[in-house]
Amino acid sequence: MPVLFGLVALVGVVCALDLVLTVGVIERLVEQSEKCARPGRAPATSVAEGDRVDAFRTVTTDGRPLHRDQLPDDTAVAFFAPDCRVCRETLPEFLEYARALPGGRRQALAVVVGEEEAAAVYAARLAPVAQVVVEERGGPVSLAFAVTGFPSLLRVARDRSGTLVTTPGGPDLGRPGTPTSRAA
């Protein structure tokens, strides 16, 4: 009988330890998800500052062909997904920023990634201030920038050799008209 009580006590201790560890893991997961959901976090892209933008060819929502070499220096590039909560929170800030760019909508590129019907609302809001591309996940522009999550907000500029490279920016993308590229 004492052996049985000892085993029951041991199982109770193991269960209590398991419960404490599980609560700790849950707290860490909540902490990490809050950290990732905060606007102001780094862009969700695997392209680092100064990395080359791969070639792409696409068509904007107004029917104009667009490729990498058409992007002027200091262009703001934003990637949004219609089903992304942080994208919805960041969109008004990007719209305000893009409206103030000295080069107008030519200096802003917005890529809406998702099904055309869901992306139409974003595209309509973005069209007055940016060139807009709607594409499925893994589309040509997303691949060229190696986008892995949303929203992704970047700047592009040419380095000394004339190669188009990225310069990540926060959701505010710096002050309009002030180059944030350090590509040299």
Image (cartoon, rainbow, N blue to C red):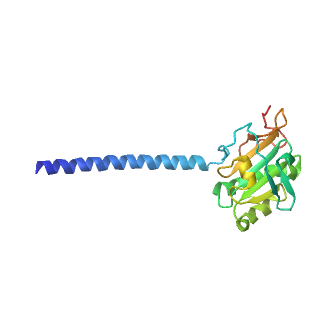
Residue 172 appears in the rendering: no
**Residue 170 picture location, percent across and down:** 71, 43
**Residue 146 picture location, percent across and down:** 69, 47
Outermost residue on the left side: it is 1
Quarter of the view holding residue 80: bottom right
Location of residue 64 with respect to 29 vertically, above or below: below
| Quadrant including the C terminus | top right
Q: Residue at x 74, y 45 (%)?
A: 154
Quarter of the view holding residue 87: bottom right
**Residue 33 picture location, percent across and down:** 55, 50
- Taking depth in this image into account, of 89 and 52 the one nearest to the observer is 52
Q: In this image, 155 relative to 40: left or right?
A: right
- Taking depth in this image into account, of 57 and 39 the one nearest to the observer is 57
Outermost residue on the right side: it is 103
Q: How many marks?
A: 0
Location of residue 73 with respect to 132 vertically, above or below: above
**Residue 16 picture location, percent across and down:** 31, 48
Q: Residue at x 20, y 51 (%)?
A: 8
- Taking depth in this image into account, of 133 and 144 the one nearest to the observer is 144
Q: Residue at x 82, y 50 (%)?
A: 108
Residue 166 appears in the rendering: yes
Q: In this image, 158 relative to 32: left or right?
A: right
